[in-house]
Amino acid sequence: ICVIKDKHVHELGTHAELLSMNGVYAGLYAYQNKELEQQKEDARLREALHLEDEEGNGTDSDGDIQQIPHASGKDSYLAINRKLSIRSRTSSRAGSIHNETAATTNRKQKKKPGYFSRVLSLNKPEGGYLIAGSISALINGASFPACALILSHVIHTLLDFAPGSDSKDALRDNVNSYCFGFLAIGASCFVSTFFQTFFYGIAGENLTVRMRRLALKGILKNPMAFFDKEQNKAGALTTMLETDAANIKNMAGPTLGVALQSIFCLVVGLAIAFYYSWRMSLVMLAMVPMFMVSGLAEAEFSKGFDGDTDETFKASGAIVSEGVTNIRTIYSFSAESKVVKLYDDSLEK
C-alpha cells in the first residue's frame, strides 16, 4: 500500500506495517472505524441494559436510578454511567431525527416561487432596463385605442359633412388636426417600440448569459452516472444550453413586453368604450369569454407542440454533436450514411 501526501510517497508497506507506523494511514483507518466501533459498543450496552431491565433493574419511568443488586462499588458506578450514557445518546439521536423530519416537512410545505418570479429575481440586476422597457410597452399599448378614437372622430366628421354647405374650411381644419394626431401617434409608437426592444434586449441577453453560466455550473456538479444516461449526452446538454436559455430570455423580455402592452391596451380601450357608450361596451364584453377559450386552446396546443419539438431537437442535436466530434472514426468506417439516417429518424419521430 502506497500513501501519497503532498505529491510525494509518504508511507509504503502492508496494512499491518502501516498501522504499526501510527502515521497518516493509521489515522485514516482509525477515523474510518471509529463510528463503526461506537455503534457496536452501543449495541452491546443496549443488549446488557435490556437484559437488566427484564430482571427489574435499571431506571424507572422518570429516569431515577433504582437498585442494581448484581453490581456494587465501582462496578455499580460504571453500570449506572453506561446506562445513562446510552439513554442520553438515544434520546439525543431521536431528537435529532425528529428535528430533521420537522425541517424536511417545513421545507416541503413551504410554497416554492413560480417560474416567472424566479426569472425576474435572476434578472434583478437589470431592473432599470426592465422598468424603462415596461414604460415603453405601456405607451405602445395605449397607441391602439388612441388610433381607434381618432378614427371614430374622422368617421363622425365625414358623416356630418353636408355637400354644398359652407363648412368646407371647418372640415379641412378638423381633418388636418386628426392627421397630425395620427402622425403624433406614429412617432410615439416608433420611439416607444425602439426603446422597448432596446431595453428588453439588454435585459434578456444578460439573463441568457447568467442562465447559461448557472446551467453549466449545475451540469458540471453532477456525478459521472448522470452523463451515462441516454438523455444526458454531450449533444443534448449543449442543445439544452443553447435553446432553453433563449426561451427564458423570451419570457423575461419580449413576452413580458407583449403582456404589459396587451393589458394596458385592454384597460385604455375599456375606459374609452365605457365613457362613450357603456351599453355597447357590455354587449361587446359578452364576446370576451369566447375569445379567451379559443386563446387558451391555441396556447395549450402550441405548448404541447413546442415541447415535442424541443425533445426532438435535443436528440438530433446530440447525434450531430457526437458525429462531428467523432468524424475521424465515422470516416474510417465509412459510416456517414448511417449517421445521416440516424439524424433523419430522430427528426421524423
Image (cartoon, rainbow, N blue to C red):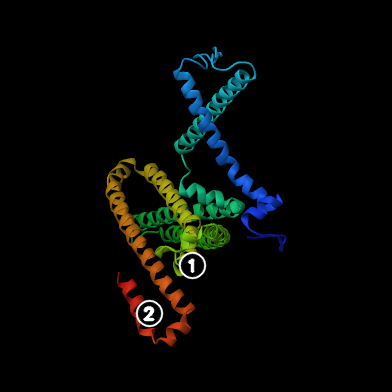
Q: What is the tally of numbered marks visible in this picture?
A: 2
Classify mark 2: helix, strand or loop: helix
Q: Which residue does the image show at 65% across and 19% down from the upper left?
A: 74
Q: Name the mark on residue 94.
A: none
- The foreground one among 117 and 29 is 29
Q: Which residue does the image show at 45% across and 83% down from the upper left?
A: 329
Alpha-carbon span between mark 1 and mark 2? 19 Å
The location of residue 83, given as percent across then percent down, is 56, 23
Q: Read off the residue under disc 2.
A: 339
User: What amino acid does circle 1 point to?
Assistant: Thr
Image depth: mark 1 or mark 2 in front: 2
Asked if one can make out residue 165 in the rendered structure from this viewpoint, the answer is: yes
- The foreground one among 286 and 12 is 12
The location of residue 283, given as percent across then percent down, is 28, 44
Q: Are marks 1 and 2 in contact (CB under 8 Å)?
A: no
- The foreground one among 10 and 54 is 54
Q: In this view, does 89 lie to the left or right of 305?
A: right
Q: In this view, does 172 lie to the left or right of 92?
A: left
State which quadrant residue 41 falls in. Answer: top right
Q: Residues within 10 Å of mark 2 (few under 14, many from 20)?
A: some
